[in-house]
Image (cartoon, rainbow, N blue to C red):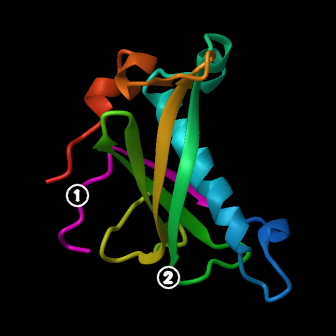
């Protein structure tokens, strides 16, 4: 993980009992909820309100989810989600997200890339659709989007 670019946003969370399956580990589908929550909080932190976009007839939608499960999270584990945004094409962006189990259980807000255990690596491809059903360039959904999207090297 030494070559990992810094995340433009991170959020610390904790696994709740009801998110675990009969094996005592987080159910695979729950990780998608963690990733979605992190994306929404990231956008909110950038001044982009998902509900406001919808009211304006702007609909960011997930069109593909690529998720690699590395290690399981268990009830009570503290973890954090890192978020980056990359250009995929003129009309698509990817939220590149990783979930790490915190090695420092006492303080999940301290994010240690390289020390914390990588639990999930995800790439969530999104598009923006207008209320008329036509695709939009992601930067047109909000003025801040242009500065959030990076072009992968």
Q: Which residue is mark 2?
A: 70
The correct choice, above or below, for 146 with respect to 25 in the image is above
Q: Residue at x 77, y 65 (%)?
A: 16
Q: Quadrant of residue 24?
A: bottom right
Q: Which residue is mark 1?
A: 5
- As helix, strand or loop, the secondary structure at mark 1 comes to loop
Q: Position of residue 106 (x, y in %)?
A: 54, 68
Relative placement, left or right, of 129 versus 141 is right
Give above or below for 19 relative to 131: below
Give, as a single range, the part of the protein colored magenta.
Answer: 1-13
Secondary structure, mark 2, is loop
Main secondary-structure element of the magenta-colored stretch: loop
Residue at the image point whose x is 54% and y is 84% from the top: 71
- Residue 47 seen in this snapshot: yes
Q: Is residue 87 a member of the stretch shown in magenta?
A: no
Q: Is residue 109 left or right of residue 150?
A: right
Work out whether residue 117 or residue 153 is closer to the camera in this orientation and state it.
153
The answer to whether mark 2 and mark 1 are in CB contact below 8 A is no
Picture quarter with the C terminus: bottom left
Is residue 108 shown left or right of residue 114? right
**Which residue in the rendered view is the most extreme toward the bottom?**
23
Residue at 62% from the left image edge and 14% from the top image edge: 57
Report how far apart the C-alphas of labels 2 and 1 lie in the structure.
19 Å
Residue at (61%, 15%) from the top-left corner?
Answer: 132
Rendering coords of residue 34 (x, y %): 62, 56
């Amino acid at each position: 993980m030494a070559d990992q670019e810094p995340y433009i946003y991170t959020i610390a969370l904790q696994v709740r009992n009801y998110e675990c399956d009969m094996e005592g580990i987080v159910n695979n589908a729950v990780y998608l909820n963690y990733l979605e929550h992190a994306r929404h909080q990231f956008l909110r932190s950038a001044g982009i309100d998902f509900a406001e976009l919808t009211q304006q007839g702007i609909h960011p939608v997930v069109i593909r989810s690529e998720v690699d499960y590395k290690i399981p999270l268990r009830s009570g584990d503290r973890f954090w989600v890192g978020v980056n945004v990359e250009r995929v094409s003129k009309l698509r962006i990817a939220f590149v997200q990783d979930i790490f189990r915190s090695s420092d259980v006492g303080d999940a807000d301290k994010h240690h890339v390289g020390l914390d255990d990588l639990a999930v690596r995800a790439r969530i491809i999104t598009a923006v659709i207008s209320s008329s059903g036509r695709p939009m360039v992601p930067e047109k959904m909000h003025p801040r989007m242009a500065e959030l999207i990076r072009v992968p090297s």
